[in-house]
Image: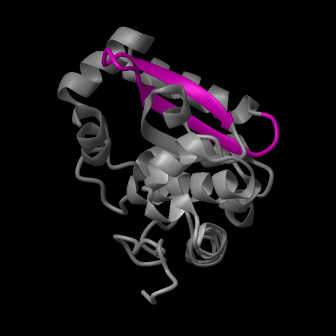
Amino acid sequence: MTQDEIFTLIDLPYSQDGLKPVINAETVAFHHGKHLAGYVKNLNGLVKGTEYAQMQLEEIVCKASGAVLNNAGQILNHNLYFLQFSGSPKKSAPTGALLDAVNKAFGSFDAFKAEFEQKGTTLFGSGWVWLAKNPDGSLVITQEVNAANPIQKGLVPLLTFDVWEHAYYLDYQNRRADYLKALWSIVDWSIIEQRYSK
């Protein structure tokens, strides 16, 4: 980190080929090492000498607009996306309070996954599908376009699948539904439970 770097590129908790065969090393290299790194570089240039230089990403996403919002939102979204995965998840399904909330909101874990995939498949253009927590602890699935994040609606973002084409095109071409279905096997639900309990 140099003096000019207010924000830095996150380190991945797995190797570039650690998510194979769901996400291959080439996709991770481009998605993390090029796309996300580019957003970090852009945001550092945009916020230098502004009020945003003293803010956390979450605050910037809730207060900024234009290019600052777009780059900060993409960093926040990608950080949550990359850090929720594991090549060998500690938990492959939610348990405890999170599972209770999933069952209450969607009827069952399988019903939740089906609705989540449907929302991800039908989101037009580029964006993100999210599982988010309301202030009362209940759960909701949201579709967010471009760099938007549920935090802008007063929700706590828990789980996200990136449906920008750069997230899946090298591995799945235009088969977004196949990509969404495959991601479940690398979600580490212990991480999502930690986010829910905060």
- Tell me which segment is drawn in magenta: 124-144
Q: Does residue 167 lie above or below 175 as drawn?
A: below
Q: Quadrant of residue 63?
A: top right
Q: Residue furthest left?
A: 96
How far from the left and from the top, in percent, is residue 104?
34, 9
Relative placement, left or right, of 170 versus 27 is right
Instruction: Name the image quarter holding the N terminus.
Output: bottom left
184 on left or right of 75: left
143 falls in the magenta region: yes
Q: Is residue 181 visible?
A: no
Res 148 quadrant in image = top right
Image position of 65 (left or right of 13): right
Q: How is the image coloured?
A: one colour
Residue 60 coordinates in the image, percent (x, y): 53, 50
Left or right: 74 in relation to 11:
right
Determine the main secondary structure of the stretch shown in magenta: strand
Taking the spot 64% from the left edge, 75% from the top edge, the residue there is 45
Against 10, residue 193 (above or below) is: above
* Residue visible at 59% across and 51% down in the picture: 73
